[in-house]
Image (cartoon, helix red, strand yellow):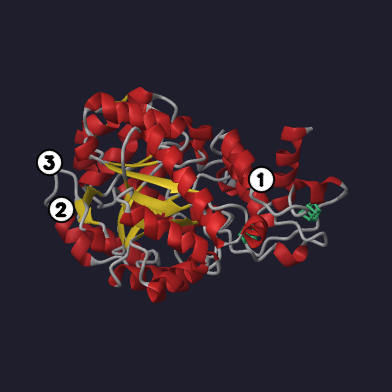
Amino acid sequence: MQNAKNGYSRRKFIFKTVGGAAAAGLLGKAGLPLAGQSAKVTAATTQAEKSPITRVLGRTGIRVPIVSMGVMNADNPALVRRSFEMGIRLFDTAWTYQRGRNEEMVGSVIKELKAREQVVIATKVPPPRPEMMDQMGDKLIEQEFLARLDQSLARLQTDFVDILYIHNVSDPATLRRPGLLSAIGKAKKTNKARFVGFSTHRGMTECLEASVLDGRFDVILTVINYSMHDDKALLAAMSKAAKAGIGLVAMKTQCKQAWYREAMPDELKPFYEGTIWHAALLKWALRLESVTTAVPGYTAFDQLETDWPVAFGLEYTPDEVKFLSDHGVRLALSHACRQCGGCVASCPSGADVPSLVRAHMYAADYGNFSEMRRALDEIPAGRGLEACAGCGECAAACVRGVKIARRLDELKSIFA
Ligand code: SF4
Ligand code: SF4
C-alpha cells in the first residue's frame, strides 16, 4: 500500500504512531478538545495492527470497519472494487448522486464481485421539496418516496438496501411528516430496506435529539468534523443518540472546504497538504465514541491509501498532533462553514445563505457540479441564487468568519 505522491506506506504509518495515552496527554496540554473521545477506544486500537478496527452500528447489529467509502464523488468503478478488496465493507451512495450513475456503479461492481452478502449498501432517497410536500399530501409523498427507492434498487441491482436514509434532513418537522414515516415503515416491512434513518447537514443537534425521542430511526449519517470540536450540544446529542442504540455514521470528516484556501497561513500549506490533514481529521472524528464508521469521499487511489490505514489504528502520529494543535490550523478551521444558520438573518433578501455556501462547497471543493445543482434545486423558490442576482455587494455575514461574499461570487461565476 504505497502512496507515491506522499511517500506514505502502511509500514511507515505504524512506525510513526505514538501511544494513545501519550497522544491524549499531548493533546490535553495543547488544549485540544477530547470531548466524547474515550481511552477505551485508544486501548482497543493499539492491538489492531493486522485487521481493521470494526464497530457495531448501534441496534442494527451490523459490524463494519471504522473506515467506509463515501462513493458520492467517485466515478471510477476500479476504485470501488479496490476498496472492497482492501477490506471496506460499507458503501454509501444516494439516489441523486451523479443523477443515478453513482448507484449504478456501486451496483455493477458489487454484482461483478458477487459480494452482495458481504457488503452493506447505504443509499439516500430525497423527499420532495418542503413546499411541494405541503401541497402533495401524505399518500403522494409516500408514493413518490417509494418510487424513488425502487429506482435506487434497480440501479443498485439488488432487492434491498441495508440502510435507507431520508436524504438531507435539516429540520425535525421533516422527521414528523406522516408520508415520509409511512414510506420508510413500508420500505422496512416489504424488506426493501433492512434499516432506516436519515442524513443531516444542518440542524444536526435538533434532528439527533428528535430521533432519540421518536425511536424509529436506526442509523443517522451526520456531518461531524474537527471544526465542530467545541460544539458541545452536537457532541452531547450524538452521545445521546448512540446510547439510545442509533448507529452514527460520520460524513464530511475531512472538512474539505474553502477554509484551507481562505484562512490557512501560506507557510503551513505545503507541510500540511495531503496525508497529515486527512488522516488527522479522520482520526479525530473516529475517536469520538459515538461514531461507528466514517464515509470519507475519496476519489483517487492515493486518497484511499491515506484514509484506509486509519482503520488500523487511531493513535495520532507526532505530525498529526502538531497539525491538530497548530494555532494557525485551528484558526483556519474556525472559518469552515458549520451550516449553523447564523448568517440567515443578515441577508436582506432572505436568501438561504447556508445552502448557497454548501452548494459552493460541492462545486469548488469537490468539483461535483451535479451535487451543486441538486443543492441549489433544493432551495425554496426565491431564496436561491436568483435572490442574489440583483444584489450589488453581499451583506450576508458569517458568525464565524466564513467569507460568504467571496464564495457566492465564485458560485455566481459558474453561471455567468
Ligand atoms: S456561513 Fe457562517 S453563519 Fe452561515 S451557516 Fe456557515 S458557519 Fe453558519
Ligand atoms: S448576495 Fe445579496 S441576496 Fe445573496 S446572500 Fe448576499 S446579501 Fe443575500
The residue sitting at the bottom extreme is 213
Q: How many marks?
A: 3
Label 3 beta carbon less than 8 Å to ligand 1: no
> Within 10 angstroms of label 1, few (less than 14), some, or many (20 or more) residues?
many
Quadrant position of residue 3: top left
Give the Cα distance between marks 3 and 2.
11 Å
Query: To which residue does mark 2 refer?
Result: 46
Is 34 drawn above or below residue 282 in the view shown?
A: below
Using the image as rendered, state which of residue 28 and residue 293 is in the foreground.
Answer: 293
Q: Quadrant of the N terminus?
A: top left
The residue sitting at the front extreme is 139
**Residue placed at 28% from the left, 30% from the top?**
110
Q: Is residue 109 visible?
A: yes
> Within 10 angstroms of label 2, few (less than 14), some, or many (20 or more) residues?
some
Q: Which mark is residue 376?
A: 1
Residue type of the residue flagged with mark 2 = Thr
For the residue labelled by badge 1, is the local secondary structure a helix, a strand or a loop?
helix
Q: Position of residue 314 (x, y in %)?
A: 25, 52
Quadrant position of residue 275: top left
Q: Position of residue 23 (x, y in %)?
A: 27, 58
- Mark 2 vs mark 1, foreground winner is 1
Q: Position of residue 278 (x, y in %)?
A: 40, 43
Residue type of the residue flagged with mark 3 = Lys
> Within 10 angstroms of label 3, few (less than 14), some, or many (20 or more) residues?
few
Left or right of 408? Residue 339 is: left
Q: Position of residue 274 (x, y in %)?
A: 42, 36
Q: Earlier in the sequence, mark 1 or mark 3?
A: 3
**Residue placed at 75% from the left, 50% from the top?**
405
Give the Cα distance between marks 2 and 1.
44 Å
Query: To which residue does mark 3 refer?
Result: 50
Left or right of 333? Residue 43 is: left
* Ligand 2: image quarter: bottom right
